[in-house]
Amino acid sequence: MSGLPFRDIAAPSMKNSEPVNGTRRPYRRIAIEVASVVVLALFALALSLIGVFLFGTPDPRTLPELSLAQTSCLYDRTGTHELYCLHGEENRKVLVHGDIPDVVRRATVAAEDESFYRHHGIDAAGTVRALLVNLKAGKIEQGGSTITQQLARNAYYTRERTVKRKLLESLMALKIELFFSKDEILDMYLNRVPYGANAYGIAAAAETYFGKPAADLTPDEAALLASLTKAPSAYSPYVASKGTSLSQRDTVLSRMAEAGYLTEEDLKAAKSADTVSKVRPFLQPIQAPHFVFYILEGLEKTYGRDALEAGGWKILTTLDWEKQRLAEQSVREGVVRNRSANASNAALTAIDPKTGEVLAMVGSRDFHDTSIDGEVNVALRPRQPGSSFKPIVYAAAFEKGFQPETLLVDKPIDFGPDGTGKEYVPQNYDGQFRGVLSMRETLAQSLNVPAVETLYLAGIGRTIDFARRLGITTLGNPDRYGLALVLGGGEVRLLDMVTAFGVFAREGVRAETHGVLRIIGPDGARVDADGPAPASVLDPEVARKVASIMSDDSARAPVFGARGPLTLPDRPVAAKTGTTQDFHDAWTVGYTPSLVAGVWVGNNDNAPMKAGSDGVYVAAPIWHAFMAAATSGAPVEAFTPYSKVESDKLLLTGLRDESAIEYFDLHSGKKLSPEKAAKKDPSRVRVSYGDGGKCILSYVNKDDPLGPTPPDLSDPMIPRWEAPAPEDFSKGE
């Protein structure tokens, strides 16, 4: 045999490979072996799960006697001024079975676990749905937890999103169902679950929100409370808008009707009730409430509701209590001054641009005033910013290569269809036009027509991307915005605007805006980790150009006057106002190198203020009062000057030869000397560069201003921008 080739020894004979009953023997052996391995693996897994079930999970009979949550408290940045505490058993009343009304049980089951009375602790269908979502997302996003699983998690585990925790929670739910009836499980859940506003259990929730015993709750009230258990901070009637709270309530009511818990008549009556108006004012001691709820919502998303409400944490926030006090005072006094302007509310937010720390946040003049929806935090609500958005657009143009010295023409221009079928012909606020001006002057004076020109030069899509880079989070549909974006046509949040201006203040570096310094656990150990490090998102020269313009009081003076509320008496400061069409919103945002503050003024119901309620009149005084007080005694910091760029391209960096500019009387057509032109109303003077008054697009390629690319003479805006101005500039017609 040793002399035979290897292949003759190793190769099976044809006879052995003949099919037997249609199956080849080696394949059958392999199938049997694989099946054996699978069976053994499943058996081992089953034994492991049984072992964990029996010995790796707590005894559920201890559930009724488990200790309740420890209190977590929020403090200012010093750790000495208490803002708010999330209490455990101090605000909990345990109800016996007979004191919990059926309407609460039904609303809770409809909201949290429609198959509660049919499963044995785990909802297989819900688990599969959650599994599919998690597999698609590549991480755990949904839990598919039943009421029993939630009880197990609240009592024994944390809300960390891991497979291990989910497995233990599921096994514990099965174990609980062996020892307790459905009514007992639901009783324990309703006595333990947090409803927000420091209300633990249905008894405390009914008293906190509606001032009544749980037994007296109506279907609409029970449905609203049941909706809170999913996200107390997000859906709270003290924080969320009225529409959001009612929408969540209606979802629960509809599910109750589908389950047969409500008749159609009862459903209609419950949905027609104004449940939110029945909610009692939030009476628990709280300081800086809008800021507190802003922090709580973020912490809940990061750490989960249970850890936050039961962790016994000491949460040191970034809040500067003295600046918060000044902010509240400035807003309160400013709203009183603005009563004649029909402006019932105001908001103010301030950050440290060097760290991104929120130093002060006032979401309305009075959190507890329901007549103005005072609980709504306007600092976090999208509103149109008016001209306060212009610095972002000009910065996008500067990044592209345009300069503060770039010359534009302020005159009536038809920019073409605006998407509604109408021609877009923007007007300046005062109806006047001022001829040839630099970008420095047009931004400082907040002139609308040159701002629209600037947005076209920068590009709408590019500007939106640029704004996002600075921290604007709300411009999610670029196709929705046209050239009116530069005049405030897109809604933004006050906090985001302050963040974006903070990038200018820190010369192009963005520090992530945040409100927590650190979290200390009951054992003294730090709970949280450091956030992202500051990152450069903008060329420092661009930020310096913006600061130079917005701090240039002389450039601003022709429209706003000198030494107005946009200046501080003892230090340089950069600021910009904004006013929306029909005076729904008024803004002022400004900064020093170490402090950024933004102010919004208006009405929460979007009612217009009186005509003439410009940002400079109703918002700037509030901003000025806060900034003057908040910077008092602080070191004076100057803005870094920018380096000027020179170019041979006409208009891009100004005119080297001022004699190239020619002036003409608009009515007579006669040429004027520079001296006579300076004495006349600028709106009645036509300006030419000695070549027929061509616009910058005739000399510069808007996508490569400083580069070698020649101008695109087919640009459709050239004939529009170079069209002769109407005879009367002053009327803008």
Image (cartoon, rainbow, N blue to C red):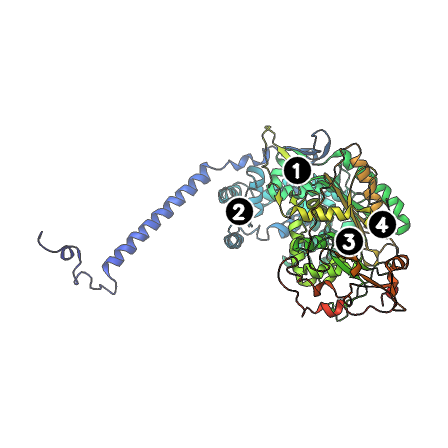
Q: Mark 1 or mark 4, which is nearer to you?
A: 4
Q: To which residue does mark 4 refer?
A: 557
Q: How many marks on residues?
A: 4
1 and 4 marks in contact (CB < 8 Å): no
Q: Earlier in the sequence, mark 2 or mark 3?
A: 2
Q: To which residue does mark 3 refer?
A: 443
On the picture, is 501 further left or further right than 176? right
On the picture, is 537 further left or further right than 140? right
Q: Earlier in the sequence, mark 4 or mark 3?
A: 3
Please give the name of the residue rendered at 51% of the width and 55% of the height, measured from the top-left corner: 136
What distance separates the C-alpha of mark 1 from that of mark 3?
36 Å
Q: Is 718 located above or below residue 626 in the figure?
A: below
Q: Amino acid at mark 2?
A: Gly
What distance separates the C-alpha of mark 2 from that of mark 1?
38 Å
Q: Amino acid at mark 3?
A: Leu
Q: Is 724 located above or below residue 316 in the figure?
A: below
Tell me which corner region of the image, top left, top right, bottom left or bottom right, holds residue 697: bottom right
Q: Amino acid at mark 1?
A: Val
| Front position in the image: 337 or 198 | 337
Q: To which residue does mark 2 refer?
A: 121
Q: Mark 1 or mark 3, which is nearer to you?
A: 3
Q: Amino acid at mark 4?
A: Ala
Q: To which residue does mark 1 refer?
A: 516
2 and 1 marks in contact (CB < 8 Å): no
For numbered disc 3, what is the local secondary structure? Answer: helix
Q: Mark 4, residues whose alpha carbon is within 10 Å: few (<14), some, or many (≥20)?
A: some
Q: Position of residue 250 (x, y in %)?
A: 70, 55
| Front position in the image: 518 or 621 | 621
Q: Earlier in the sequence, mark 4 or mark 2?
A: 2
Q: Mark 1, residues whose alpha carbon is within 10 Å: few (<14), some, or many (≥20)?
A: many
Q: Earlier in the sequence, mark 1 or mark 4?
A: 1
Q: Mark 2 or mark 1, which is nearer to you?
A: 1
